[in-house]
Amino acid sequence: MDYKIKLQIFEGPLDLLLYLVKKDHLNIYDIPIASVTEQYLEYLNLMQLLDLNIAGEFLVVAATLMQIKSKMLLPVQETQGAEEEESDPRAELVKRLLEYEKFKQIAEELREKENNQRDVFKRPKVEMDKTASDNKEVYFEASIFDLINAFSAALKDVPKEVFYEVIKDEFTIEEKIHEILHLLLVSSSVQLSELFNKAKNKIEIIVYFLAILELIRMKEVIIRQRELFQEIEITRNKENIEPDDRRTQREITGA
């Protein structure tokens, strides 16, 4: 498939490292560099498999991780002074991660304040709406790395194929986009695993994944989770639904 996607939804390499640390509940002050490096490179390989536009910073951090891993494999050399201690090769990376996480938290707090400020001069909602809001389930927005993690798991579950055979191009991204949007007209949400389980082979899984990325880029869908690192759900972005789409959805669901 010759289909390149350039996305603004991709976060940076430090976001990926923080994601790997939190996903496996690792101690950020004592990162198992060999395991994290292996997972990091696996994510980069998946991005390249999908022909996604990878920024140079990802490759720089990959080189940094491999350098740290090499240093930690070397035997500890004796120092001249008894008080001298060899510094941890991970120290600078840990410092960068902690600073980056701090700035991310501050940015998120400012974003929440901005969203709250938008509601200051709005007309008060009726009590019924307030009750409905209180009973509303809480969801977490899934990251691009959550998507890639689910994609990787789906690929591992598919039996190995003979890749030298000529496989007919049965699937297109445009068709999968229409299929996903139609499913979201019938149901309010679709689980990512359901789409992957329907796939006949790895090629169809890849096409589903690229279709989802394209829908995210077009702001047609939102990906979310009930709990962090759990099942991913795909829903329509209500802010981007045209009035005709809303009427069609009511007709299909009978609402």
Image (tube, rainbow, N blue to C red):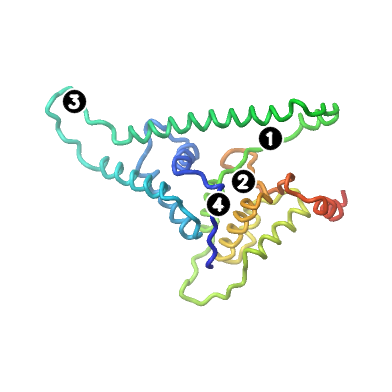
User: How many marks can you see?
Assistant: 4
- Mark carried by residue 84: 3
Residue type beneath disc 4 = Leu
Tell me residue 48's x, y (percent): 46, 58
Instruction: Looking at the image, tell me whether mark 3 or mark 2 is earlier in sequence order.
Output: 3
How far apart are the alpha carbons under marks 4 and 3? 48 Å
Tell me residue 209's x, y (percent): 58, 57
The answer to which quarter of the image holds residue 154 is bottom right
Residue type beneath disc 3 = Glu
Residue type beneath disc 2 = Glu
How far apart are the alpha carbons under marks 1 and 3? 51 Å
Instruction: Looking at the image, tell me whether mark 1 or mark 4 is earlier in sequence order.
Output: 4
How far apart are the alpha carbons under marks 3 and 2? 49 Å
- Mark carried by residue 138: 1
Left or right of residue 21: residue 217: right
Report the residue marked by disc 4: 7
Instruction: Looking at the image, tell me whether mark 4 or mark 3 is earlier in sequence order.
Output: 4
Report the residue marked by disc 2: 231
